[in-house]
């Protein structure tokens, strides 16, 4: 076994690897960028070394040669890549091994064989793994591709061969739309991956995304059953579970065999995932699944497999990479119960799931769940990296019990300091179709309006915020009386820009009467606990003037000074501002240019995503205030239009 390993990653996965390494007595070396100087993974490691000259991944976590040099300088014997960054970069693997170090993962050859979707599918066909009907050839002539689509039969899916994250992917349902969709997919693929080549596949009408966890030692492999990752939004996984709902033993055996054949065909070593597209229109059946791609690394959703099998996949990675054989054979592996994982992000769901930043003023998870997180209270969600706060993971003896535990864990998770997708996750967990196991990759898109409803803000929530703001929770006998008269106080608060006044009559230490507009809320302290309108006072956290009431997945209020309160005016439609800190990738506006409402004026890159900034009205560009390559803060003015009456 290794004495020391370097973890070439950050955040949640770096912390996850460190936990297992520490339990095995293996020391860890962390690397960190400028933005991560005080990060959780830095504090957890036995050693931490600054890398690069900035915060951007290209200036830090993607510097393979520097990472290898740090590993050698610190005496690390192996490098664990986590996922993302350099985890599936075969050139990095070659360089690690050339330096006399061990790469904790598959060989560079295996990564190369699975790196391009078209080549991987051809290889899988040779290995006897079922592949979706489609065209994966080298001929990229538009007329040839159109003919291939006709042969396959519409609807078809155009996919970038070097794709990922839904980029370079277009659904075409009618032949007349093929040419335009092809140009769009190729353009996006060129921008994202530097490779315009595409493949054409039959589009599965009621698709499910089911993947098989495999583990190999370079010669033989086993599978650790399946995960269902069908709950996706824009091809990004949201909630994963294991095992897949509706799975039967015949299909599980067939998928498991296919996954093992895929791994053994490329001499796979370590943890990997074979992803399949499944036709769920008539139930799960052994002839209704097809190879999609193989992820040659540990997956974000690996914890659900760990919980149903009792296997620590990171421990297996370290053991096999150090030269041990597979810790268990296929017959020794079994499924116990059911598990779910929900991805908790800092993002503004009502604003179209816009990634958010901010300092986490409060972060607490219930003891009933496993929370894999790379941040703590006091940490900042940076614009440089993925805005994940945590993975909320639960296990139960049955799917129904596990789902109930997931709902409870999400309801009891407390996050202050930034907006999150907690309410969205809670709505998904309570979705009738999902609860019944009736899932497919289109569920979220079909029911999006239902799933993004804002939690109801009740008078009791406003009264609770008022109690916190005025310090009326921990009260004594001297609270509320002035010369034998009841005390009347008030506080001005706002929620999402809507200001209101909360007035209270303190009727002794155990009773308060709140009036908020036309609503009245009576707070009584019973048995040492406050009760408002029949419900217990929810937990709260305050940071500066921001109060978060932890009910309805977190409701934020701002304490405002009435002397500073001004009537809220509409937003300035003349200014196009950065909605978050980020890098200006492109500016399309020029001074004097006439624009229409909805025209794209600039592109901002933040949180590994590109955001188009659009004109809010028809008008003329007065001045351009930013240029491509500028790093800007949230609220920075990028383009100004002339006044409407100019």
Image (cartoon, rainbow, N blue to C red):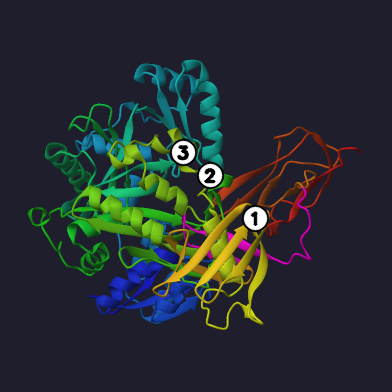
Q: Split into 4 quadrants, where in the image is the C terminus?
A: top right
Q: Are marks 3 and 2 in contact (CB under 8 Å)?
A: no
Q: Indicate whether 54 appears above or below 425.
A: below
| Residue named by callout 2 | 192
Q: Give the percent coordinates (x, y) of residue 20.
A: 28, 71
Q: Is residue 102 magenta?
A: no
| Residue extending furthest toward the front | 484
Residue marked by disc 1:
583
Q: Residues within 10 Å of mark 1 (few under 14, many from 20)?
A: many
Q: Residue 316: where, in percent of width, then height?
A: 22, 64
Instruction: Indicate whether residue 567 is drawn in magenta.
Output: yes
For residue 165, what is the image quadrant? top left
The residue that appears at 55% across and 24% down in the rendered structure is 180
Q: CA distance from mark 3 to mark 2?
A: 32 Å
Answer yes or no: do the residues labelled 3 and 1 have beta carbons within 8 Å? no
Between marks 3 and 1 in the image, the one whose residue lies nearer the viewer: 3
Q: CA distance from mark 1 to mark 2?
A: 16 Å
Disc count in the image?
3
> Which comes before the other along the chain, label 3 or label 2?
2
Image: magenta residue range: 546-569
Which labelled disc corresponds to residue 450? 3
Is residue 361 in view?
A: no
Residue 267: x, y in percent? 22, 52
């Amino acid at each position: 076994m290794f004495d020391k390993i370097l973890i070439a990653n950050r955040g949640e996965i770096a912390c996850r690897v460190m936990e297992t390494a520490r339990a095995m007595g293996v020391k860890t070396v962390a690397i960190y960028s400028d933005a991560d100087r005080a990060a959780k993974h830095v504090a957890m490691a036995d050693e931490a070394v600054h890398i690069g000259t900035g915060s951007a991944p290209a200036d830090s976590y993607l510097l393979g040669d520097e990472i290898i040099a740090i590993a050698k300088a610190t005496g690390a014997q192996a490098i664990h890549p986590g996922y993302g960054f350099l985890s599936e970069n075969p050139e990095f693997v070659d360089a690690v091994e050339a330096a006399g170090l061990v790469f904790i993962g598959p060989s560079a050859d295996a990564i190369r064989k699975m790196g391009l979707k078209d080549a991987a599918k051809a290889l899988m066909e040779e290995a006897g793994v079922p592949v979706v009907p489609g065209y994966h050839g080298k001929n990229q002539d538009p007329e040839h591709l159109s003919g291939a689509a006709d042969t396959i039969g519409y609807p078809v899916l155009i996919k970038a061969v070097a794709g990922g994250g839904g980029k370079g992917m277009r659904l075409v349902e009618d032949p007349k739309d093929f040419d335009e969709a092809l140009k769009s997919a190729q353009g996006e693929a060129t921008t994202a991956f530097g490779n315009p080549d595409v493949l054409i596949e039959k589009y599965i009408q009621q698709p499910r995304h089911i993947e098989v966890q495999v583990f190999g030692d370079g010669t033989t492999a086993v599978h650790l059953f399946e995960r269902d990752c069908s709950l996706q939004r824009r091809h990004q996984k949201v909630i994963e579970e294991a095992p897949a709902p509706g799975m039967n033993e015949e299909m599980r055996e067939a998928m498991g065999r296919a996954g093992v054949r895929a791994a053994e065909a490329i001499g796979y070593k370590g943890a990997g995932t074979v992803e399949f597209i499944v036709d769920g229109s008539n139930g799960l059946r052994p002839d209704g699944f097809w190879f999609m791609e193989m992820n040659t690394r540990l997956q974000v959703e690996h914890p659900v497999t760990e919980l149903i099998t009792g296997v620590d996949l990171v421990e297996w990675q370290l053991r096999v990479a150090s030269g041990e054989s597979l810790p268990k054979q296929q017959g020794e592996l079994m499924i116990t119960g059911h598990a779910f994982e929900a991805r908790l992000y800092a993002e503004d769901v009502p604003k179209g799931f816009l990634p958010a930043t901010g300092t986490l003023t409060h972060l607490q998870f219930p003891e009933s769940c496993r929370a894999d997180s790379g941040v703590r209270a006091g940490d900042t969600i940076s614009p440089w990296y993925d805005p994940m706060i945590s993975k909320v993971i639960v296990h139960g003896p049955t799917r129904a019990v596990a789902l109930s535990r997931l709902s409870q864990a999400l309801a009891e998770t407390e996050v202050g300091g930034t907006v999150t997708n907690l309410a969205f996750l809670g709505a998904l967990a309570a979705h009738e179709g999902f609860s019944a196991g009736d899932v497919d990759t289109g569920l979220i898109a079909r029911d999006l309006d239902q799933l993004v409803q804002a939690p109801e803000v009740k008078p009791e929530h406003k009264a609770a915020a008022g109690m916190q703001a005025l310090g009326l929770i921990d009260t004594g006998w001297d609270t509320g009386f002035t010369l034998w008269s009841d005390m009347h106080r008030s506080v001005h608060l706002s929620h999402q820009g809507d200001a209101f006044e909360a007035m209270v009559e303190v009727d002794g230490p155990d009773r308060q009467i709140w009036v908020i507009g036309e609503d009245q809320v009576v707070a009584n302290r019973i048995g040492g606990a406050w009760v408002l309108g029949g419900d217990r006072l929810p937990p709260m956290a305050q940071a500066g003037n921001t109060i978060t009431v932890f009910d309805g997945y977190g409701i934020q209020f701002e304490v405002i000074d009435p002397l500073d309160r001004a009537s809220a005016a509409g937003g300035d439609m003349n200014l196009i501002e950065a909605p978050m800190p980020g890098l200006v990738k492109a500016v399309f506006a020029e001074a004097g240019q006439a624009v229409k409402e909805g025209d794209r004026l600039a592109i901002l890159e933040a949180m590994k995503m590109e955001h188009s900034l659009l004109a809010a009205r028809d008008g003329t560009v007065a001045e351009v205030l930013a240029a491509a390559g500028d790093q800007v803060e949230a609220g920075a003015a990028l383009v100004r239009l002339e006044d409407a009456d100019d």
